[in-house]
Amino acid sequence: MRKWLLLILISALLLISSCQEENPYTEYQFIMDTQCAVTVYKRADRQAIAGVFSLLRELDSKLDRFNESSEVYRINLNAGSMPVSVSDDTFRLISRAYDLCLATDGAFNPLMGRVSDLWGFESTNERVPSAEEISSLVSHTDISGLVLDEEEHTVYLVDSQAALDLGAIAKGWASQLAADYLKSRGVERATVNLGGNVYVIGQHKDGRDWVVGIQNPYAETGGYYATVQCHDEAVVTSGGYQKNFVRDGVVYHHILNPETGRPSDSDLISISIISADGALADAFSTACFVLGYDETVKLCEEYNVRAVALTEDDEVKFINF
């Protein structure tokens, strides 16, 4: 439900900020386990939307680790056994994930699949695993065990207990590929919204930037605590309010600290990353939520990206603006 609220909120804000455009037109499809929306502003651009959804479905078929016919599923199935040949798209994304893991000192780690499964966040059987269960699987998440052969285009997990999970980067990557596709078709103004992973293309006809709202995590019926103006950029938000469960009065959210294998307990309630690099924005939003405010500032300054943070003290911080 929260993902729907975020999607509706962002769509509404984009619509409000585009009231002087040429009849915004939006189509929706459920892909990559989320409601996706593509909006264009010229009648002639509507024909390009079908191509975007086709691209997203193709990416999903390769990257969904629970789909037995996907490339990521085959990589995990053959962990500790043999390298797996993959498509160019999959290889490039996994290579990007590897690099961003190093860039964040492991705060974003694409090998957390089996640890995440322990908690049951992708199922209806959420549970709080024991410390022994967690530690036994955290020991199998070393990024050095992800071996990429660029010449052969293969991916190999050295550790048989490791599992690749691209859920914290795939939508950001896909939103940028979708934006690139629209631009290649001559689309000058559009928005791609993959369940809250937003990529905006171009600007208003009068040169104004788009306005994107960031959901207020305390608002059950929507609402936002900040807005950002941007063009040709992704806006990706991470927060513990988006997917969680409660056991014995304790809230457990899905953003795990790779060091502990437990839900992150940093001083951030929400973090939004704004960058022209959709994959980076997605991965950094997860990493920064784990790292906390001070490290977020350092990371954003080092990589020259903007961020909006809501701290545990309910302070709104604009970083690198």
Image: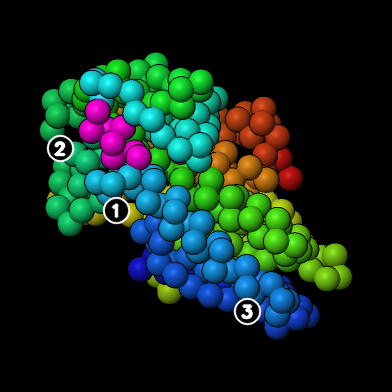
What x and y, as percent, mark residue 181? 63, 55
Instruction: Tell me the kind of residue under disc 2.
Output: Pro
Residue 321 shows in this picture:
yes
Front of the two marks 3 and 2: 3
Q: How is the image coloured?
A: rainbow
Contact? badges 1 and 3 (CB < 8 Å): no
Element on which disc 3 rests:
strand
Task: Please name the predominant secondary structure of the magenta segment in the image.
Answer: helix
- Magenta residues, start to end: 71-78
Q: Say what amino acid the circle numbered 1 marks.
A: Asn
- Residue at horizontal 28 percent and vertical 40 percent from the top: 73
Q: Quadrant of residue 24?
A: bottom right
Q: Residues within 10 Å of mark 1 (few under 14, many from 20)?
A: some
The CA span between labels 1 and 2 is 15 Å
In the displayed structure, does residue 93 sit left or right of residue 275? left
Sequence order check, earlier mark of 3 and 2: 3
Q: Which residue is mark 1?
A: 244
N-terminal of the two: label 1 or label 2? 2
The residue beneath circle 2 is 129
Inspect the magenta stretch and tell me whether residue 192 lies in it: no
Residue 191 drawn at (x, y percent):
63, 64
Nearest-to-viewer mark from 1 and 3: 3
